[in-house]
Image (cartoon, grey):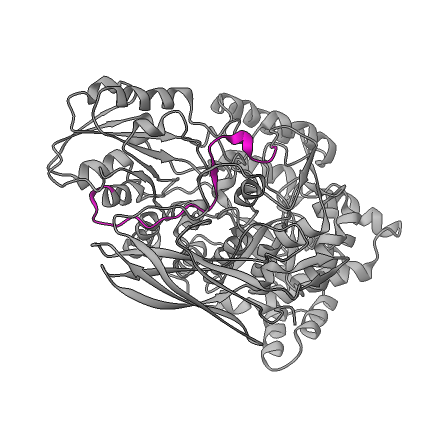
């Protein structure tokens, strides 16, 4: 006879000293066969779940799984991210790429804590917003959801977010792995050799996994001929056996697997978010011997171990609902937006004087909320400060006018600020309903009734009407639209100084107009307080301190190939800054680029290396007349190596605050494992002298340099 408290009893036994594995196995033994199978997929029936999602909207839902009321097993309630909680009203932080430009893991942890609290208020217990797929190419439509192009940087930021969230809820890192293109994500097979896979596209996942993240989400695409949701090589041999992950693996939503038995044997624990492929096929496959009950039990026990391990989070007092988009979290969003803004060009026109008389603001994006993707990462804040709002409030003595596309309105102004860029219709999650319907015919269960079929068809027809311009997908070009480029040139033709503010989740090629303007800033998708942050930087109340988390070429043709629609892609060792360094191509804005109203430079660098790891000590100076923040980048290379390598690779970074004229010495741990070579299933360390640089950006000619050997970080 059950009491409904079996789960809590298992938690209590674990806290009393029983092994986690034994506590989970004992609880598993109390489940019926049907209950065990029900834990292997989401808890909602497929068509009811799809109708609910289409009715409420992509992000206005929780997705429960693994709930067994009879034994008190709580399962979890999944809510998406990553720029906040994707359910109801929530604080909208800048997108992850913007936060990546801030290079501040400590702040990212605080943002994670805030998101974790708001998630609990909204009924969630699992946050699905730790997206750390590498930015292989800036045209990737979901670039905004990750932190940049460098594995060390992305791993540190992802670990910081997940650790912050897990003060209050479980976190899920995604999409495992090599999911760096959007429009073809359901069909593309990525070919990736051993070195590129382990040295470039997996280190950041290993970092987040080994930081203690609760769950991992598999990707839609296939790798080396095998769907990620069916890949034992990825999900068991690497993730679980090599890295020691003992949490839960879930699929990406709806099309994360194509074969129930193959996914179970590969290491997928839960098919999300509905009862779909496993619900239809697993009972028969067990009866036929394709899957054994021992394999089902092992999977269920992995899920139970995760739920037991994180049960303490549910026992915490529920946060006060007033925190949601309240003063503290709003201030956190503002701080993040201020740190993220990158001053890319400035010939002295910025900062603006408070006495600026007439400011002409141009561009449609200046006056509309532009928060980023409208798909699964959408967040609904209670208010949004647009760039125009921020400028009007931030310059109360100025006469501010606005026009969407008439640059002649600027001819009598003292300054023109042109706001240009992309929206959710240009980049983001690819939401093409026509592309999904054939796959539903293949994999979805039958409709349960004619009424259900009619409701779904009605909603699809309405969605087509609402989405006359389907949002999302990869970008066809890194250039601004022809309209935006012409607006900039027309504003410059008036003869007034022009400041360009770019909004978007990734790179913009600026050739053809950059030499016609006085300053360029990258505002990204800056969250609910973005306009306030912009005005603070324009006015000099805040010294800009953002740095580019990727390299921008002078011509997008100089980057590795990127196709919008393809069945196959090759991922190699070099991309972004590394690729352009190797090829000798010109880089307009290198990785780490970011100007300031002050001045910073390295004075000295020493490296201490020993069995506990390597540590850089960097003396850094603010050479200017204004206090401000800067980011110290530590790059390393192996000049004597016979292996193909990046010219320099990031192994550490640290954000630092200095008063005008101040110098300080900062200690930065070095992740020299980034320099190891993967060969035949093993990690190798070349016993060669390293060149280590402390720099403001990749290729900084004023970098402080240290050379010497260090002990292998692999032991």
From what the image shows, is residue 428 above or below residue 101? above
Q: Nearer the viewer, residue 626 or 52?
A: 626
Q: Is residue 9 left or right of residue 621?
A: right
Residue 370: x, y in percent? 37, 35
Q: Residue at x 88, y 52 (%)?
A: 289
From what the image shows, is residue 396 above or below residue 21? above
Residue 568 figure quarter: top right
Residue 407: x, y in percent? 26, 20
Q: Is residue 360 left or right of residue 512?
A: left
Q: Residue at x 83, y 47 (%)?
A: 284
Asked if the magenta segment contains residue 549, the reply would be: yes
Asked if the magenta segment contains residue 587, the reply would be: no
The answer, for residue 84, to whether it is visible in the render is: no
Residue 562 figure quarter: top right
The prevailing secondary structure element of the residues shown in magenta is: loop
- The quadrant of the image that shows the C terminus is bottom right
From what the image shows, is residue 577 above or below residue 496? below
Q: Residue at x 52, y 31 (%)?
A: 556
Q: Nearer the viewer, residue 107 or 73?
A: 107
- The quadrant of the image that shows the N terminus is bottom right
Residue 604: x, y in percent? 39, 65
Segment colored magenta? 538-561
Q: Which residue reaches farthest bottom? A: 17
Q: Is residue 464 left or right of residue 322?
A: right
Q: Nearer the viewer, residue 408 or 649?
A: 649
Residue 596: x, y in percent? 29, 48
């Amino acid at each position: 006879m059950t009491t409904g408290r079996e789960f809590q009893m298992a938690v209590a036994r674990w806290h009393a000293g029983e092994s986690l594995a034994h506590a989970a196995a004992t609880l598993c033994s109390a489940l019926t066969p049907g209950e065990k199978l029900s834990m292997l997929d989401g808890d909602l029936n497929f068509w009811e779940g799809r109708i609910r999602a289409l009715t409420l909207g992509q992000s206005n839902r929780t997705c429960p799984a693994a709930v067994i009321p009879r034994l008190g097993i709580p399962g979890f309630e999944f809510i998406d991210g990553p720029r906040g909680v994707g359910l109801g009203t929530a604080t909208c932080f800048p997108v992850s790429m913007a936060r990546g430009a801030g290079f501040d893991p400590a702040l990212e942890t605080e943002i994670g804590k805030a998101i974790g609290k708001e998630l609990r208020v909204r009924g969630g217990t699992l946050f699905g917003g730790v997206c750390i797929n590498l930015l292989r190419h800036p045209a990737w439509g979901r670039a905004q959801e990750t932190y940049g192009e460098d594995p060390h940087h992305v791993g540190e930021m992802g670990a910081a977010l997940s650790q912050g969230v897990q003060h209050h809820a479980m976190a899920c890192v995604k999409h495992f792995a090599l999911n760096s293109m959007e429009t073809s994500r359901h069909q593309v097979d990525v070919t990736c050799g051993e070195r590129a896979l382990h040295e470039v596209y997996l280190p950041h996942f290993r970092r987040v996994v080994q930081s203690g993240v609760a769950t991992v989400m598999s990707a839609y695409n296939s790798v080396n001929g095998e769907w990620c949701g069916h890949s034992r090589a990825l999900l068991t041999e690497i993730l679980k056996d090599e890295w020691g992950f003992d949490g839960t693996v879930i699929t990406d939503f709806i099309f994360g697997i194509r074969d129930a038995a193959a996914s179970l044997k590969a290491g997928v624990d839960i098919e999300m978010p509905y009862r779909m492929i496993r619900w239809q096929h697993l009972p028969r496959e067990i009866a036929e011997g394709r899957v054994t009950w021992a394999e089902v039990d092992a999977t269920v026990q992995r899920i139970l171990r995760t739920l037991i391990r994180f049960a303490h989070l549910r026992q915490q007092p529920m946060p006060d609902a007033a925190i949601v988009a309240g003063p503290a979290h709003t201030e956190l969003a503002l701080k993040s937006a201020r740190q993220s803004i990158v001053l890319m060009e400035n010939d002295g026109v910025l900062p603006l004087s408070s006495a600026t008389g007439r400011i002409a603001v141009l561009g449609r994006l200046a006056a509309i909320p532009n928060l980023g993707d409208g798909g699964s990462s959408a967040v609904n804040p209670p208010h949004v400060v647009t760039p125009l709002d921020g400028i009007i409030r931030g310059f109360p003595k100025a006469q501010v006018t606005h026009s969407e596309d008439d640059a002649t309105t600027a001819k009598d102004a003292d300054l023109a600020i042109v706001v240009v860029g992309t929206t959710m219709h240009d980049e983001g999650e690819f939401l093409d309903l026509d592309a999904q319907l054939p796959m539903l015919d293949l994999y979805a269960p039958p409709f349960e009734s004619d009424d259900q079929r009619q409701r779904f068809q009605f909603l699809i027809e309405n969605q087509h009407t609402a989405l006359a311009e389907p949002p999302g997908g990869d970008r066809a070009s890194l250039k601004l639209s022809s309209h935006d480029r012409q607006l900039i040139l027309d504003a410059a033709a008036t003869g007034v100084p022009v400041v360009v503010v770019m909004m978007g989740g990734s790179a913009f090629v600026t050739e053809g107009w950059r030499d016609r303007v006085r300053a360029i800033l990258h505002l990204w998708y800056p969250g609910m307080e973005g306009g306030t942050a912009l005005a603070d930087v324009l006015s000099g109340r805040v010294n800009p301190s953002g740095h580019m988390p990727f390299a921008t070429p002078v011509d997008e043709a100089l980057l590795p190939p990127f196709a919008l629609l393809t069945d196959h892609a090759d991922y190699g060792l070099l991309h972004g800054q590394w690729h352009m360094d190797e090829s000798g191509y010109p880089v307009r804005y290198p990785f780490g680029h970011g100007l300031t109203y002050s001045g910073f430079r390295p004075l000295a660098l020493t490296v201490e290396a020993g069995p506990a790891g390597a540590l850089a000590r960097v003396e850094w100076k603010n050479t200017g007349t204004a206090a401000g923040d800067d980011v110290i980048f530590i790059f390393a290379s192996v000049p004597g190596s016979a292996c193909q390598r990046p010219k320099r690779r990031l192994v550490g970074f640290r954000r630092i605050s200095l008063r005008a004229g101040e110098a300080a010495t900062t200690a930065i741990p070095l992740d020299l494992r980034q320099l190891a070579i993967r060969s035949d299933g093993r990690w190798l360390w070349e016993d060669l002298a390293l060149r280590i640089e402390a720099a403001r950006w990749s290729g900084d000619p004023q970098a402080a340099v240290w050379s010497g050997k260090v002990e292998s970080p692999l032991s």
